[in-house]
DNA sequence: CCTTGAACCTGCGGGC
DNA sequence: TGCCCGCAGGTTCAAG
């Protein structure tokens, strides 16, 4: 799935295309995403105006009139595709939103780990999906001091802690690996045992890699595409992610000797790191 | 409370 | 060519 930079990119594309438009119709072709679609969603959305589109964690939030917000999550394989003409539904096109300026937006998600909900705008922070979430990594409050306190009692590896959305949101498998590389931290290190200097490197590393990825329009792997159909290109800048046996970014080692980037499994997920630089 | 592992679902690429 | 396996950007739930 799309991690924070990809979701941010999608939100910006949707905001540009949809702000102030009115929903004329929702074609809900599949009701069994990660959670069942809300009752009568199509009827409830008809005629509603889009006020604002933004992101929280990896969720796309679309504020509508009448103080309700449409919540979308892309799961692992979700995409939003904007079209300027009536489209013919393709495989895994689960939701097709039509708007009054002849734009359609299709939510396509082969694995169906994505989700769509509608909730009261004023009560979003109490919503089941949001109430447990940690800080935004690009926000002001996300500081080394704050992160130190949050990780203090954690025995899990730092890699797992970065993926824990109760600590900090938006970081997924790619950007956890990348940020730890730039911070020169071994992913196996216990989160609570990190040294002050390490956390001092980690926070800016996270912010830097997320910002750079947003600038690049996100990472397009197998099936992720920006809302406007353009491909993001950050995958061409990965330092370690998906680079087993290859040199890490800026590597001066003899890869024949060191073996280059290594892959291990943590919490059932692949971690890529440089055993030379990340200690 | 904490941590770990499995589950959800589909598609793709590699090895034989 | 086809089959089988492992792997894929996330989140949640059960079990220890």
Image: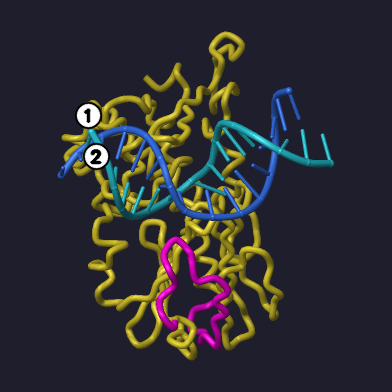
Chain colours: A yellow, B blue, C cyan
Find out whether the residues at labels 2 and 1 contact each other: C-beta distance under 8 Å.
yes
Instruction: Name the quadrant containing residue A236.
Output: top right
Question: In the rendered image of this protein, does residue A146 appear above or below residue A44?
Answer: above
Which residue is identified by label 2? Answer: A144
- Badge 2 sits on which subunit? A
Q: Position of residue A219 (x, y in %)?
A: 56, 48
Q: Assess disc 2: are there few (<14), some (14-19) or many (≥20) residues with their C-alpha within 10 Å of its C-alpha.
A: some
Residue visible at 50% across and 26% down? Answer: A263
Say if labels 2 and 1 share a chain: yes
Q: Secondary structure at mark 1?
A: helix
- Confirm whether the magenta stretch covers residue A35: yes
Q: CA distance from mark 2 to mark 1?
A: 8 Å
| Residue A234 circle label | none
Q: Nearer the viewer, residue A244 or A117?
A: A117
Q: Nearer the viewer, residue A118 or A262?
A: A118
Residue visible at 41% across and 80% down? Answer: A39
Side of A209 where A230 appears, left or right = right
Q: Which region of the structure is painted magenta?
A: A18-40
Residue visible at 48% across and 91% down? Answer: A47
Magenta-colored segment: predominant secondary structure: loop
């Amino acid at each position: 799935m799309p991690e924070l930079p990809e979701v941010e990119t999608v939100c910006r594309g949707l905001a540009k295309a949809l702000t102030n438009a009115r929903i004329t119709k929702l074609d809900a072709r599949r009701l069994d995403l990660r959670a069942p679609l809300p009752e009568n969603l199509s009827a409830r959305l008809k005629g509603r105006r889009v006020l604002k589109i933004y992101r929280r964690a990896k969720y796309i939030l679309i504020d509508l009139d009448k103080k309700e917000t449409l919540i979308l999550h892309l799961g692992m394989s979700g995409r939003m595709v904007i079209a300027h003409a009536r489209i013919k539904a393709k495989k895994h096109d689960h939701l097709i939103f039509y708007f009054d300026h002849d734009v359609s937006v299709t939510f396509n998600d082969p694995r169906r780990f994505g989700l769509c909900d509608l909730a009261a705008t004023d009560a979003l922070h109490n919503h089941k999906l949001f109430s447990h979430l940690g800080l935004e990594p690009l926000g002001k409050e996300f500081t080394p001091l704050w992160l130190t306190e949050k990780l203090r009692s954690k025995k899990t590896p730092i890699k797992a802690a970065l993926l824990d959305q109760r600590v900090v949101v938006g970081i997924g498998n790619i950007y956890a690996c990348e940020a730890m590389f730039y911070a020169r931290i071994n992913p196996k290190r216990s989160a609570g045992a990190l040294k002050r200097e390490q956390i001092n490197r980690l926070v800016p590393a996270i912010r830097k890699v997320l910002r750079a990825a947003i600038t690049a329009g996100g990472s397009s792997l197998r099936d992720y595409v920006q809302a406007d159909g353009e491909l993001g290109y950050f995958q061409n800048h990965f330092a370690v992610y998906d680079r087993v046996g290859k040199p890490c970014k800026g590597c001066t080692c003899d890869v024949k000797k060191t073996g280059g980037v290594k892959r291990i499994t943590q919490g059932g997920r692949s971690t890529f790191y440089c055993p030379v630089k990340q200690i």
